[in-house]
Image (cartoon, rainbow, N blue to C red):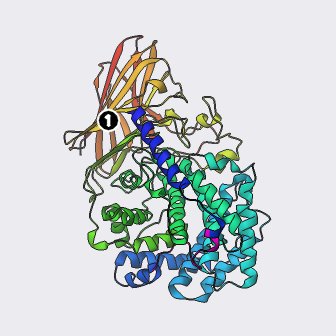
């Protein structure tokens, strides 16, 4: 299966690369482009949203939200160049949020105060000494902000403002990408590639009239580069950086696609890259019935119920309205939080393209995918917060933004998350304390951070040792039947001192979970089975731990072997730089392993009430 996945990825890259090379981007194309606005919007988008806002409650709710964000943007001083640590990223994002919301509000209402405020934000940013090119992600988002505002408000900007914004996009953005010290992102297989290329393409298309030669050069280079950023979606749509980073990278990928379509009339087949469109199903299943995400890798605490409105673009693209079912239900209730709120004006236009008469739940309750971070997900249904949910993953610590979490799982039943992932920790809180968070290798200080290593995850640990950085847990078998949904992962290469280690984790329709670990040790060792949980816990017997939360009870029970040692451990941070983990703990069992012998550890999670 691993080799098949590699072949699929390779063929996908050939397809995208061949599709792009077949198009010769020229300065003449840039000079002959449609007038402003030429970025992101399709004909009729604005009129359709204005009409639907009075007819469709979900569109009305998001329309009101966008207008409130625009009204907030009118207040206070314009943004200043204030770095946090080594990043200007927070400022770039705030400029994007303000410019996009105010520009959108102007298009929807014609009220000049919104255009004036967007213009002031763009001019202030244009006058920064630079956009922090040493962390080029900051540049990518700032170029996007000024490109969209410049394009959407072109006819109402003063000549002076227009000239300053054009010059800043070119000099601080497009020419900055020509600096060899910054060009490494062109070959990155992660969100950096998508964000930087997406921002640069929008910037180039926006100022194409001013400098068609440079615009053509930038667009051509980004089209050649973007195949790297699209690789992680293959083969099935599992985004290896996790739930939160899918939003980030994919928003910029969609903006790049839509800008190419609206400005040049051609997306150059980017959306056909293997796994890209399918990743919308991955994202739907990543949200549990409780509204919390399966927050593996650097995806935060996974505790917020949010609307992921980018899925409206995928629903329209695939003509599958089931992809927005959950988010439409949230919007209908009127109380919602928007994921990546700076993009909500674009989401409003994408929502306006949806057919609300065909919004139904997804047919399937089970989904799985391969790739860098293979996983499976089961949910008991799509209509109740107390439906069962089980998600488990393989993968490697060597992947971008990964944790030492191969074999880990989250589990919900009865409206309670019994097995949880603590999530990531704010980068600045670690970097400011001298933690070299991005160092690679087995001995990187990254793996001393409690939330990132295997000691805090619901997985296996041998002799208190960290998982092996170069190891990878592959998903070797999948089970998809009413009596048994789940998969088996081969953890052998993650665990030192074992000859083989496989974890089979399944759930039945009653919500009971079976976790069967089969291990052959290479030496005498201690095997620790761990589950991280926010529930209260008590050791009931030598083989049973009882969990209780929100009036519900769950029994964590060992069927075999006969001799195990149960434990309950605090999640108090071991270092002063670790984030607190209030309200959580680890429960589990310890088993002694004998060398070269097969050991079977069978654990059941049994709902009691």
User: Residue shown at 34%/50% (left/top)?
Assistant: 416
**Picture quadrant where residue 589 is located:** top left
Q: Which residues are magenta?
A: 29-43
| Residue 518 can be seen in this image | yes
User: Residue shown at 43%/55% (left/top)?
Assistant: 272
Q: Residue 285: horizontal and vertical position, in percent?
A: 35, 52
Tell me the SS state at disc 1.
Answer: strand
**Picture quadrant where residue 154 is located:** bottom right
What is the residue that sits farthest to the bottom in this orientation?
A: 111
**Residue underneath mark 1:** 487
Q: Residue 188: horizontal and vertical position, in percent?
A: 60, 46
Q: Residue 228: horizontal and vertical position, in percent?
A: 55, 47
Does residue 464 appear left or right of residue 601 in this picture? right
User: Residue shown at 49%/62% (left/top)?
Assistant: 267
Residue 179 in the magenta stretch? The answer is no
Quadrant occupied by the N terminus? top left
């Amino acid at each position: 299966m691993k080799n098949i996945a590699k072949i699929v990825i390779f063929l996908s890259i050939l397809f995208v690369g061949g599709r792009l090379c077949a198009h010769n981007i020229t300065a003449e194309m840039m000079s002959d482009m449609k007038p402003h606005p030429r970025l992101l919007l399709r004909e009729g988008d604005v009129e359709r949203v204005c009409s639907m806002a009075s007819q469709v409650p979900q569109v009305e709710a998001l329309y009101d939200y966008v207008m409130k964000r625009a009204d907030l943007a009118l207040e206070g001083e314009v943004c200043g160049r204030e770095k946090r640590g080594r990043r200007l990223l927070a400022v770039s994002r705030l400029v994007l949020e303000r410019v996009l919301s105010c520009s959108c509000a102007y298009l929807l209402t014609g009220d000049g105060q919104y255009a004036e405020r967007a213009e002031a934000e763009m001019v202030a940013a244009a006058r920064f000494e630079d956009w922090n090119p040493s962390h080029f992600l900051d540049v990518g988002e700032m170029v996007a902000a000024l490109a969209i505002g410049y394009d959407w408000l072109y006819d109402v900007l003063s000549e002076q403002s227009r000239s300053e914004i054009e010059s800043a996009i070119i000099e601080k953005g497009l020419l900055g990408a020509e600096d060899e010290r910054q060009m490494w992102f062109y070959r990155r297989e992660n969100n950096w590639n998508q964000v930087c290329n997406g921002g640069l393409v929008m910037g180039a298309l926006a100022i194409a009239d001013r400098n068609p030669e440079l615009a053509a050069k930038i667009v051509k280079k980004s089209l050649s580069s973007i195949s790297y950023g699209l690789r992680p979606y293959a083969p099935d749509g599992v985004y290896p950086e996790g739930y939160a980073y899918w939003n980030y990278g994919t928003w910029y990928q969609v903006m790049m696609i839509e800008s190419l379509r609206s400005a040049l009339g051609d997306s150059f087949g980017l959306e056909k890259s293997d796994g890209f469109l399918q990743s919308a199903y991955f994202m739907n299943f990543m949200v549990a019935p409780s509204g919390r995400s399966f927050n593996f890798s650097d995806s935060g605490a996974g505790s917020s119920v949010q609307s992921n409105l980018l899925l409206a673009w995928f629903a329209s693209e695939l003509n599958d309205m089931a992809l927005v079912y959950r988010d439409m239900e949230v919007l209908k209730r009127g109380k919602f939080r928007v994921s990546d709120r700076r993009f909500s004006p674009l989401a409003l236009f994408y929502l306006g393209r949806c057919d609300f008469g065909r919004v139904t739940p997804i047919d399937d309750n089970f989904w799985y995918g391969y790739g860098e971070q293979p996983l499976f997900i089961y949910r008991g249904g799509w209509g109740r917060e107390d439906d069962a949910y089980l998600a488990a993953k393989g993968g490697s610590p060597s992947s971008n933004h990964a944790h030492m979490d191969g074999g880990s799982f989250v589990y919900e039943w009865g409206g309670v998350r019994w097995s949880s992932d603590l999530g990531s920790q704010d980068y600045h809180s670690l970097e400011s304390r001298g933690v070299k968070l991005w160092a690679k290798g087995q001995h990187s200080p990254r793996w001393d951070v409690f939330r990132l290593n295997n000691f805090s995850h619901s997985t296996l640990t041998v002799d208190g040792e960290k998982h092996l950085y170069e190891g990878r847990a592959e998903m070797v078998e999948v089970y998809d039947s009413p009596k048994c949904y789940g998969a088996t992962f081969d953890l052998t290469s993650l665990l030192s001192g074992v000859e083989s280690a496989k974890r089979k984790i399944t759930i039945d329709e009653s919500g009971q979970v079976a976790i069967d670990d089969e291990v052959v040790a290479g030496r005498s060792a201690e095997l620790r089975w761990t589950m991280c949980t926010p529930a209260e816990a008590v050791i009931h017997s030598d083989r049973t731990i009882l969990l209780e939360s929100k009036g519900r009870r769950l029994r964590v029970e060992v069927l075999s072997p006969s001799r195990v040692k149960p434990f309950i451990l605090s999640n108090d941070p071991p270092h002063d730089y670790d984030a607190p983990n209030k309200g959580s703990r680890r429960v589990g069992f310890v088993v002694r392993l004998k060398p070269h012998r097969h050991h079977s550890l069978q654990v059941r999670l049994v709902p009691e009430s």
